[in-house]
Amino acid sequence: MRTSLRMLTVGAAAALLLGCVSGPAASKGVDGPDRSRVLVFSKTAGFRHDSIPEGIAAVRELGATGGFAVDATEDAGAFTARNLARYDAVVFLSTTGDVLDTTQQAAFERYIKRGGGYVGIHAAADTEYDWAFYGGLAGAYFQSHPATVTVEDRSHPATSGLPRSWERTDEWYNYRSNPRDRAHVLASLDESSYTGGTMSGDHPIAWCQEYRGGRAFYTGGGHTKESYAEPAFRQHLLGGIRYAIGAAQADCRPENGYRPLFDGTAESLAAWKQAGPGSFSLSDDGTLTSHDGLGMLWYAGSGFGSYSLKLDWRVAGDDNSGVFVGFPESDDPWSAVNKGYEIQIDATDAPDRTTGAVYSFQSADLKKRDRALNPPGEWNTYEIRVEGERLRVWLNGVKINDFTNTDPVRSLRDGHIGLQNHGADDQVSFRDVRIKELPTKGD
């Protein structure tokens, strides 16, 4: 444990930690053109963490079970355009100081801009202070503490398997600039749970964001050797790597200004009502799952006119459900069908009745939908944005539908939202329903 206070200019975390767009560079590894390949880079020009060997071993083990090949190097000469093109992502594992020369930096910039992936672990935020592409300033206390990590995004593959409150011991950095406005925060520190936090109660510790054409993920954990033997941290790291190499999709756009309508607690269901048969069960991890017949759980607390609605959903297999918007207050689920619109969740059906469709009115862009969709068993995120009579749908950050209501019987300008429970055998789960009300606009 290093207890001295050192002020850092972080290039690692604040820029490339960010990522979420185009697919990764084509993998050309010796194991075949279709196998993903990751390069672990752990060169240090400053303080060297003694956990680096454990980190390399952990990534190799995760690759062996996760389906990607892993190379490891401390040779900055690996940063050439030709060599980087072999990899779907580069992991900066507790790198420190100036580790690349200007030619190597330029090669890495081109790699990211062409869709490459980046994963930063721990002291990757103590690297390349003067490289603007990599950077953003931050400061860090080098001291280990037990602390509570608050998981903010429970859909991203790096955090979907974690509890809302994650108790763990690590070395917690304080960042001079808060990435929340430009990055999608996945987890933050509860500064009241430990001493040494200096970010005024808003302390992101893991995040992702689109960055100049590439995917990137950063976690502040990973200082200790014990981290890499911890099952929860290994799953966290595996999810971040899977995201960076394009094996899993997620919405990594910044998310601010939303308030919860359902936050995983029984108390937050007080404003919701069940219409029709069937129901939803609430599990200990805050997940709602549909069962027992055709009905709808709808938010009766208020209607909404102009808003962005976000929620996370998961299907077990070829299951049927949907999200209703724009329907009048009613305990009859058919009111939502006949007077509102359903954004469909269904793996197989006609194009206007499958995932991302405005049910029976307009298909999603199926090519974009298929690229953005995670398979059964994994979480997806919808954003449903209603402004006037215009309804748009994003799946894992990708816009897949843009529909305008022209039916005089229906109006999106004021209505309720609801979650469908479909057939008795359909199991669809929901988490974290949240909304941001928007200024009223015309069509």
Image (cartoon, grey):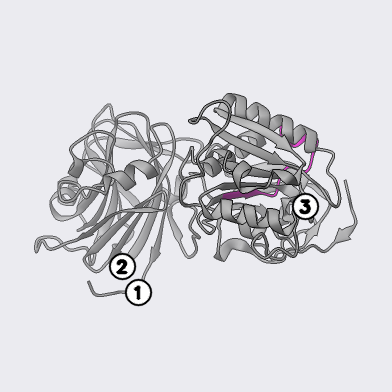
For label 1, count other residues whose C-alpha is less than 10 Å away and answer few (under 14), some (14-19) or many (20+). Answer: few
Q: Mark 2 vs mark 3: which is more N-terminal?
A: 3
- Compared with 351, 135 (above or below) is below
User: Where does the magenta region start and end?
Assistant: 216-229
- The residue positioned 57% from the left and 55% from the top of the image is 110
Number of callouts = 3
- Nearer the N terminus, badge 1 or badge 2? 2
Tell which of 238 and 429 is nearer to you. Answer: 238
* Left or right relative to 210: residue 279: left
Q: Which disc number belongs to residue 330?
A: none
Q: In the image, residue 392 lies at what x, y percent?
A: 29, 58
> For this rendering, which residue is in front, 261 or 345?
345
Label 3 SS: loop
What's the residue at 73%, 48% (across, down)?
122
Contact, CB < 8 Å: mark 1 with mark 2?
A: yes
Q: Is residue 394 a member of the stretch shown in magenta?
A: no
Callout 1 amino acid? Pro
State which quarter of the image contains the C terminus: bottom left
| Residues at marks 1 and 3, CA–CA distance in whole angstroms | 47 Å
Whether residue 214 appears in this view of the structure is yes
Residue at 33% over, 41% down: 370
Viewer-nearest of discs 1 and 3: 3
Residue wearing tag 1: 439
Instruction: Give the left or right position of residue 312, taking residue 365 as reference.
Output: right
Whether residues under marks 2 and 3 lie with C-beta atoms below 8 angstroms apart, the answer is: no
Of residues 416 and 405, the one nearer the viewer is 405
Image quadrant in which you'd find residue 85: top right
Residue 182 picture location, percent across and down: 55, 64
For label 2, the SS is loop
Residue underneath mark 2: 306
